Image (cartoon, coloured by chain):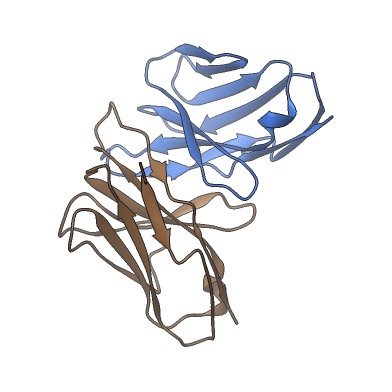
Chain colours: A blue, B brown
Amino acid sequence: GQQVMQIPQYQHVQEGEDFTTYCNSSTTLSNIQWYKQRPGGHPVFLIQLVKSGEVKKQKRLTFQFGEAKKNSSLHITATQTTDVGTYFCARMKTSYDKVIFGPGTSLSVIP
Amino acid sequence: NAGVTQTPKFRVLKTGQSMTLLCAQDMNHEYMYWYRQDPGMGLRLIHYSVGEGTTAKGEVPDGYNVSRLKKQNFLLGLESAAPSQTSVYFCASSQTGTVSNQPQHFGDGTRLSIL
């Protein structure tokens, strides 16, 4: 259907290592949003990508939208313990009235 | 700024009981959403509303009802609670649903256990 898949489901990294999570769709996406949820917290919006091949950066975080608009990635450089949490990508349905979330990637950072 | 406020934060129910979860937003947002979050399944949309007086079904609407009598409030009702409805419930709101979509703002969640 119109689900998005995320890989990996879990990732454990040593502090200072890089981390990447991937979001894949079988259909073309109009846009993609990324959210972060800290343990015990609520999802917080990080960024939205709209254009094919778009790349956006937020400090150590780099977000990329694929050329075919069927995949996206979030890369964190030199992870810190504050990066711990679950990262969700979310797609908007073509009717623009609701957002469908991926299953998320849970990141653990070992100090 | 309060943002999105959910009440209650925690609740334990017995099977068959009914209850209402309240979501209130003070950002004058048009769109409001109810999600449930279960381990390993991300966020699943239960119902949503694109404006006062309107509601629509999401991915997992069965067993739930909603109402949006006022723009700032979105109520989620469990008619006859079942153990399968044990979950964390999140409410969210956004300004619009257009392609230049505004981000969704989430409440802190309601942790609901059905015994």
Count of numbered circles on the image: 0
In the picture, measured across the screen, residue B56 lies left or right of residue B40, that is: left
Q: Position of residue A60 (x, y in %)?
A: 62, 15
In the picture, measured across the screen, residue B61 lies left or right of residue B112, that is: left
Res B59 seen here: no
Q: Is residue B25 above or below residue A92?
A: below
Q: Is residue B19 above or below residue A43?
A: below
Q: Give the quadrant of residue B47.
A: bottom left
In the picture, measured across the screen, residue A34 lies left or right of residue B75, that is: right
Q: Give the quadrant of residue A95.
A: top left
Which of B42 and B24 lies nearest the eye of the viewer? B24
Which of A52 and B100 lies nearest the eye of the viewer? B100
The structure residue drawn at horizontal position 48% and vertical position 13%, both measured from the top left corner, is A56
Q: Is residue A83 above or below residue B66?
A: above
The structure residue drawn at horizontal position 23% and vertical position 53%, both measured from the top left corner, is B72
The structure residue drawn at horizontal position 19% and vertical position 54%, both measured from the top left corner, is B71
In the picture, measured across the screen, residue B38 lies left or right of residue B104, that is: right
Res B2 seen here: yes
Work out which residue is located at the far left of the displayed protein and give it: B53
